[in-house]
Each structure stands twice: as C-alpha cells, then as structure tokens.
Image (cartoon, coloured by chain):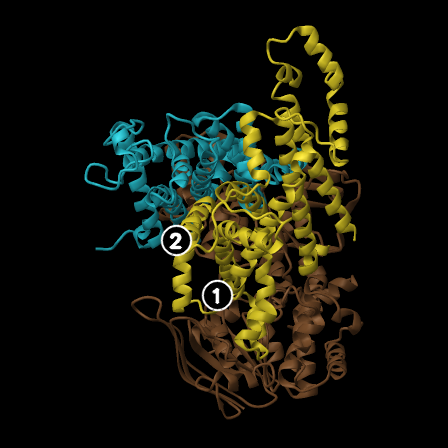
Chain colours: A brown, B yellow, C cyan
Amino acid sequence: MLDVIDLNIEFHDHITPETVVYDFDLHMEEGEIVGLVGESGSGKTMSALSVAGLLSRKNMKKRGTIVFNGVDILNCKRSELRKLQGNDIAMVFQEPMTSLDPLKKIGYQIEESLVIHMDLDKEERRKRVIEALKDVELDNAEFIMEQYPHELSGGMRQRVMIAAALICEPKLLICDEPTTALDVTIQAQIIDLLKKVNKDHGTAILFISHDLALVKSLCSRVLVMYKGNIVEAGSSNEVFYNPGNDYTKALVSAIPKLEKKTGEKEEDNKDKKDKNILLKVDSLNAFYPVGDSLFKRGDRRKQILHDISFEVMEGEILGLVGESGCGKSTLGKSILSMVKYTQGNITHYSEKPQMIFQDPYSSLNPARKTGWILEEPLRIEGKLSDSERNIKVVEMLKKVGLDENFTERYPRELSGGQRQRVCIALSLMMDPKLIIADEPVSALDVTIQAQIMDLMLKLNREMGISMIFISHDLRVVYKMCDRVMVMKEGRIVESGTNEEVYFSPKHEYTKMLLNAAEKY
Amino acid sequence: MRFVLRKIATMLITVLLVSFFVFLAFQVIPGDPATAMLGTNATKEKVEALREQLGLNRPLMIRYFEWLFSFFFGDMGTSYSYGVSVRSMLAGKVPITLSLTLISFILIILISIPLGIETAEHEDGIVAGIIGGLNQVVMAIPPFFIGILLTYFLGLVLQLFTPGGYVSYKTDFFGFLYYLLFPAIAIALPKAAMNMKLLKSSVLKEAKLDYVRTAYSRGNSTKDVLYKHVLKNALIPVITFLGMTLADIVAGSLIVEQVFSIPGIGRLLITSISNRDYPVVSAIIAIVAFIVIIINFLVDILYLIIDPRTRG
Amino acid sequence: MNKPEWMKNRKFVTGIVITAIVVILSIIGTFFTPYDPNAMDASAKLAPMSAAHLLGCDNFGRDIFSRIMSGMGTTLIVAIGTVLIGVMGGTVVGAFTGYYGGVIDEVLMRFNDAVLAFPSILLALVFISILGSGKYNVIIALGIVFVPSYARIVRSEFLRCKNMDYVKSAKLIGVSDLRIIFVHILPNAYKVILSSVAIGFNNAVLAEAGMSFLGIGVQPPDSSLGRMLSEAQTYLFIKPSYAIISGSMIVLMIFGFSMLNEGMEEWSDA
C-alpha cells in the first residue's frame, strides 16, 4: 500500500545544505500498525508529513520516492494529492487544541473531509458525523457538534480529531504524537480506541511517538530514528527486548522500569527511619479566588486542596503523583507560601527550601547570563565577596555536571537538559535541606530525562538533600522516590512506600493509574 | 448575555470617567468662569453675584452630575465668545464630521482588506513587492499632507474637484459626498496602509499554525484554507486595530477639515481653543469621546460574534 | 569581511541613515543656517530655487532651506522631550501596575481606557487650551498624552513576565519586589520599550506637525514644519514646491523612525 524508498529531506537555508532525513525507507501493508520512534529533532515528524504530502517549505528539497496505492506523492499534481488527503490518508496531530480551528464548530470540522471528497447531502453528512462521534466513544454527539474546540477537554478534542480523520474511512491514518499532550488514563483510552479502529475498519496506522514503551504496546513493527537516520527497524518485541543499536539500547534503558528494586535501596530506607522531620503539613486547604474583579471581591473561591497532611523526613525523596489538575503543583507552591489563600499549618524545620520548575525555558531569566543568575542568591544574602561568589558558582556548576564556561552564556544558548542542570544548581546555591521539584523532567527527551534523574539522585545521596518530587509519570516517580503520595481532585487518595503503593495498591484510582502505566 | 451586560457596565464606567475628566479639565482647572466672563477688572461683588447665579458655589460632584444630565438632555451650555447655546452651534456641524469619519472608515476597509489578502496570498509576487514598498511610504504621510497633495494634483492640476468648494448636504447630497471623498481618501490612506500590512502579517502568521496543517491534511485547496479557515482568524487583530484607530480617524477628520475648508466641528474646535471658549471645547471633546467609546463597544460585541472564546 | 548582524537588516539600516541625516541637519541647524530662518527679505518673496536660495523663499522672503533645518530641530526637540516624559512615566506606571495588579491596577487601567478613548492629538489640544501654546507646552501636553500608551505596553510585558518561573524562583531566593521589577523583569522589557520608543518618535512628529499645522502648536519665532506647511497651503497654486518640500520633510522624519522601529522588531523576532 505504501512504499517510501530513500527519502532524503534537505534544507537549503544556508550555504551548506542541511540534511534532516537520510535515506528513509518504509513499507506498509494494509491494516498494519507501524511505530516510528525518536526524540525531538530526529526527523520522524518530517518523514511522516512527507508521506501525507504535507511538508512543503521554502528552500526545502525532497529526494527519493513515496508511492501510495500507485500514486507518486512527491511528483504528482496538487489536485491529485488533494484527492488522497483526508480521503485515503488522514492525520491526527499532537496538540488537539491548536490543531482544530478555534472559530469553527466541531461538527463543521469533522464533516469537512466529507464535503471535500464525497457528494452527500446535508442530512447524510450529519448522520455520518454523529456515527463518527459515536465511533470514538463520544456520547451526546448532537451536542458536541455544536460546541467549539475550547469548550471540550483535551481527551475529547483528540477524539474529535480522530473522528474527523476517520470520517472518510481512510486506508492510512498517520498519528503524530497523538497522546503526548494527554494524561495517562486518557492516553490509555486513546490507544485502545486506535486499536479498535484498526480492528474494526482495517485502517493502517503509522504511529509516531517519542515513547518507546507506548509504541510497543500498540505496534507490531517499529522504526527507530536518530538524527535523521533509521538506526533500527524490526518487530516491536525484538527492538524493545533485544535492541541491536547503541542508541536504541540507550533509549530502552532510559525508560524507568516498574520492577521491584534491589536490596540496596531497601536498606537505605531503613536508615532513614530514625531521621528528623524536615517539613510537616497539617490539614492544609488551598483555594483560588473565582471572579475576582473591581466589583466583586473574591468571596467565591474554588477549593483546590482538601485537608492534606503529611511529613517529609530528612534525606528522603517523597513522590507526589497525579494527573493534570489534581492539585499537585498547587500543593508544591502552597508549601513555599506561593499560594495566596490557604488554611492549615505548614511547619518548616529547615531554612530556605527551594523549588525546581517544570519548564526550563521559563525558569531562567532570558535577559541575564547564567553566572549572574546563579550569583543572585549570594548577592541577596550579601555574605560573600565577588570572588568568593564566583568560586561558589563554579563549584555548583561542577556539581551539576557543567563547567565554568557556562557562566558567560545566556539561557537561550543552552539545551533543555543544560538549562535544567542550571536550575538545579540555582536551587543548591542557598544550601537548602529541602527541594520541591515540580515535574522537573517532563519537558525533556527520554535520554536527557534519565541523566537529570541520575543527577538528582546523586545529589540526594551525596548531599542528603530531601526532595518532594512532583510528576504525572508513575515510572519516573518510582525510580526517584522512597515514598509516594497519589493525588486526585485535591485529595491524597493513597500514600505509602514505593513497594506498598506500586505492588499492592489499595485505592481504585491508584490501580487505574498503574494499570494504564504498566500496560503501555 | 452576562458578558454583554458586563461590557455595557464597563462602557458606562468609561463614559462616566471620561465625562468627569472633561468636566474637571474645563470647569475646574481653567479657573473661575465668572472671572473669565467679567474680566479681571470686575469688582468682587459682581463676580460673587455671577458665581451665585451660575451655581459655582455648590459642591463639585453635584455640579458634575448636573452638567452631565443637562449635557445628555441637549443643554451643553453657552458659548463664552458668541453668547449663543453650544447646541445650536454644533447642530449643523456634527453630521458633517460624522459623515467624513464614516466615509474614511469605509474607505479604509475597502482598500486594506482586499489588498491585504492579495499581498498575503502572493507573498513573493511583484504586485505584493510594489504594494509593500509603497505601503511603507504611505504609512508615513500625515493625512493633512495627503490632503494638500490631493488639493494640488487632483484639485488644481486635474480639476477633479474645486478646492474649498464645499457643497452642503442640504443643497446637493451627492455633491456633498463627492466633495467629502477627497478628504476621506487623505484620512484613509495611511491607516489603510497600516491595516493592510497588519492583515498581511496576520494571515501569514496564522498560516503557520497547526490548524492550517490540519485543514490541508483534509484535502482543502490553498484558497479554501485561506477563505474558510485562516481569514476569519486573521481578522481578529485587524478588528482590534480598526477599533483602536478610530480615535485617530476622528482626529484626522478634525485636521483635514481645515485643509478642505469643511465647516465641521474641527474648525469650530480650533477657533474655540484659540478663543479659550471652554463650553464649546468641552462639548466637542465629550461628543468625540462618546462616539469613540460607543464604537469601541460595538467592536467588542463584534468580537463576541466572531470569536466564541470571548463568550466565556 | 563579515558584516555585523544589524547591517544585514535593510529596514534598520534605512532607518538609521535617514534618522542620522535628520539629526545631523538639525544639529547643524541650531548653530548655523545659510540665512537667519526668520529674516524677511521683501525682494525674495516666493523666490524660486536658485544657488542663493537652495529651496527658494517663502511668502515673506525667508529662506526655506534654513527654515527647514531649524524646523526639523524644533520637531526633534519636541519629539525627544515627549518620548522621554512618555517612556519614563509609562514605564514606572506600567511596571508597578503590571507587577502588583489588584485594585490600583484595575482603576488605572479603566483610567487608561478612558484616556485612550480620546484621539491623542485632541487630548493634547485640551492641555494646550489650558496651558497655552508654545514649544514647551506642546512637549508637556504630548508627553502626558503618551504616558498611557507606554504604560499599557510595559504593563502587558510585566503581566507576561511576572508569572514566569524565573520570577517565582527569584521570590523564593528572597529578592525584594523592587529588585525583581527593575533588575530582573525590566531588562526583559527593553526590546519592547525600545521599539515603542521609535513608534513614539513617529507619533510625536506626527502630532507636533498636526498641532502646528492647526496653528496651536509651536509658535514663532520657533519655526516648525507643520506651520510651514499650513502657510504653504495658501500659496499652493503659485508655489506648490513650498508645500511639497516642507510636507516631504515631515514624511521623511516619520518614515525614518518607522523604519527604525520595524528594523528593531525584525531584530527582536529573530
């Protein structure tokens, strides 16, 4: 059905052309599900967009052949290509919010392909749209058709995207990171939905993702891309359990495993039992004001946190896991008095706890050099001289695996991983005993993620720094933490040691999360 | 609906604030109107008597609300210079300036929207290049200078109209419109150039967004993507600009009226400022501000219609 | 042989060149002009362009070239003064309201909306009608009028920045609010402020020319391009070059500043 042979993509923006995809080969049969895995910048999205005939830009050259059911995608006329797009080849994109036209009703966006490719009257189209919405398990189809994208949740929007893609019963569905922007449980639902679509309609799926574990659960075959090359191809099990290529090996080993940890860590835990308390949170409630304006003081408040109590011991890493909107970030901020309306007691037994934020792009001041940023806490303290400050900055940079050359660089000159290292160094400048890390690795590629986690574990071991580690990713939390708390809708629904929570969960919600994380 | 009510509430607050500024600026800051009317040589008793008569001895807020109410019921005070009611002075002039503003506004839309779409669609074409370059210069020309250039080239050289030969709408309505066309062009050209540029860059910016890729992935032609998806989104900042620019268009009208000898409120305003005829000045300023506020309100409503996200 | 980055930006270079010419001409004009810009010469009334009078003479026999040089100087001084008042006032107001938010911010923003409902030139005329005309009153009037628009720009920049994680982390470190506002956030707003400075010049030149054209701006003996244009209008039929030249000078100044602004915007986008 689809044959891609020796696809090369080059950009001629500068004097020396830059090749972003080298000799890409892909053969797909009808009804097959193939995974395409790689980190950001690996060229996976470019290759997939070329297959759909959607990649065109100034100064770009594509060589090779792409043949879909006898049509030469790279060399055919636009009109011929358009007959395929939306009809035989359909796409689902990563960000369902931005991928839908914000000003058009859902019904319009789903039936658009029908209008373009088929000669149906209004009533028939409406029937097809309702059917398609039911197919993606959205009830209340008539209501949803009249909604606008911003009125739906992320999961619903992605279902709408899939419904719109499937409306003409395409032979090939290309999904570009369709679940990356979604919560784990929703992610699991979408994957199940794609499996069902494949089974019921025989739709072939090209599934692009950075997440090897996810790809393995869905696809029979996998291609791994790295810096524009296909470095490994084969059956999912083969690639996952027996990778041949070094990069693939690194990729596989970077995925934190949910297996029982070895004895060494257990002993660590015992040691920590007799340590001091660092933080005590007692029946904490937090609120956000609703409709605060000039006319109305915020008497209506939305409660974000309900009656939360826990302790953090010296030297331990406490995991805080939950889906988006469960209040885990608010909890982190409340502990550092960054939330205006709270009730309850928070007692710190250490000075100046610090925070590491999720987005390394916004947590460093873009107008200042790294050295200046790192010196700021010392300047504020005012104890050290210029040269002493300098020495301490370099010392911290070395501790996080960077060197003194970084002091003269602006944040924009650093990679995501390097920025996060600088953020960690910044949080260390004031010698805190407690660091709250809010999704510190979520914005990073898998291999970088693993490096940052190793760094944080090292700091915990060597400097005895306690952490509250907030994440949506159960695997990451498992690797990092000694104890875990699971949050849902502003409440802690379960807490305990890693082993207790992960291997004998009591709460239904924990079970569901684990199920979703383990399956994929 | 609640949103519309809130918009109306903020509009009313703005009206109150604006009118209060006008009141403060012209009734309080310039000094005592009684002294101003009687001259500095007048005796204290005479001034005091006049103050009593004019009601100047009462508290500020009461005077303000009195002034506001009488303003809305058409009593705008009496001109210091001419001794006639401000209302009668403005009666024939407001429609002229309003017409000029309106024609300019329509011209801006008629010129900028098609050209903006055209230059965005054929971004690298020759036409887009020429228009783009011309645009940069036109944006920099003040309306009154365009007015003078039009007067010279179209009026004196080509004799398409008679400079200074204003035709009243009472005698010849179409002649009136025709005469206003030239000052309207002068006002509209620079704004149309800016708006065209904004629309072009807005279209190009929107065209890079994800939903456009989705639209292409469904088999839409470039034209369909532009007209069915991109354009509506791209118009949102354009509407904002048109709303913001409205104040400038009114100001442009006031000045360009001078160039074309149009007896609108612009001329009256200038002479009143020179004569320090505060009742007239304050009435004109208030009227202009109210017009701008009302049209801004309509722009807000237009947002609600176009962009469902603002209906929250 | 590599050109520095800014030289590749054609708009920026155009803007720099034009602005430089304008600035140099007006600086020279304050010390030396071919003729006294106010000296009337009855024998040279409406004289055509010649070697003696490069651009000819006006209706009083004054040398147009000399008047343009000194007029540009006046306009430039008005623009600089206006932008200084506007930017400084606007930055302080915008920084504090944007950073602190709350009731004061709401009230000031309503106030801002109200002020922006007036055409800026009209608002300036209100001040002029109270203060009286003349160069310095024009500066004060226009400066005050421009404060709200700068405040709005700076405020929105502060609104964007104050929720960034780097501000939160600065607070955690214990940095004071004042230091966060001026040392941490303000450098991030430089680009926006700088490019709005160029727009500010642009608007100031336009407004000054408009006011002087109406006869309620700069007063004699200061010469002004707007005033020249309004005098030239009377003699449009006899000597169109007078109007065209003095108008074109206004256009040249505005064009230079708008090129500068666009160049800077391209620059900060890159």
Residue B16 placement (x, y as % from top left): 71, 35
Looking at the rendered structure, the secondary structure element under dot 1 is: helix
Report the residue at 69% width, 37% height from top: A347
The reply to whether residue C234 is visible in this rendering is yes
Mark 1 neighbour density, 10 Å: few (under 14) some (14–19) many (20 or more): many
Q: Position of residue A406 (x, y in %)?
A: 38, 48
Q: Quadrant of residue C168?
A: top right
- The image position of residue A476, as x and y in percent, is 60, 61
Quarter assignment of residue C48: top left
The quarter of the picture where the C terminus of chain B appears is bottom right
Q: How many marks?
A: 2
> Is B115 placed above or below C231 here?
below
Which disc is residue B120 wearing? 1
In the depicted view, which residue is nearer to us: A333 or C180? C180
Residue A176 showing in the rendered view: no
- Left or right position of A273 against C6: right
Q: Which residue is located at x 65 percent, y 45 percent?
A: B95
Marks 1 and 2 sit apart, C-alpha to C-alpha, by 36 Å
Q: Return the chain for callout 2.
A: B
Q: Tell me whether the residue at label 1 lies in contact with that at label 2, contact meaning CB atoms closer than 8 angstroms.
A: no
Identify residue for label 2: B157
Residue type, numbered disc 2: Val
As drawn, A194 above or below B22: below
The answer to whether dots 1 and 2 both sit on one chain is: yes
The chain carrying label 1 is B
Looking at the rendered structure, the kind of residue marked 1 is Ala
List the single residue furthest toward the left.
Answer: C51
Q: Does label 1 or label 2 sit earlier along the sequence? A: 1
* Residue furthest bottom in the image: A70
SS of the residue under disc 2: helix
x, y percent for residue B112: 52, 59
In front here: A460 or C69?
C69
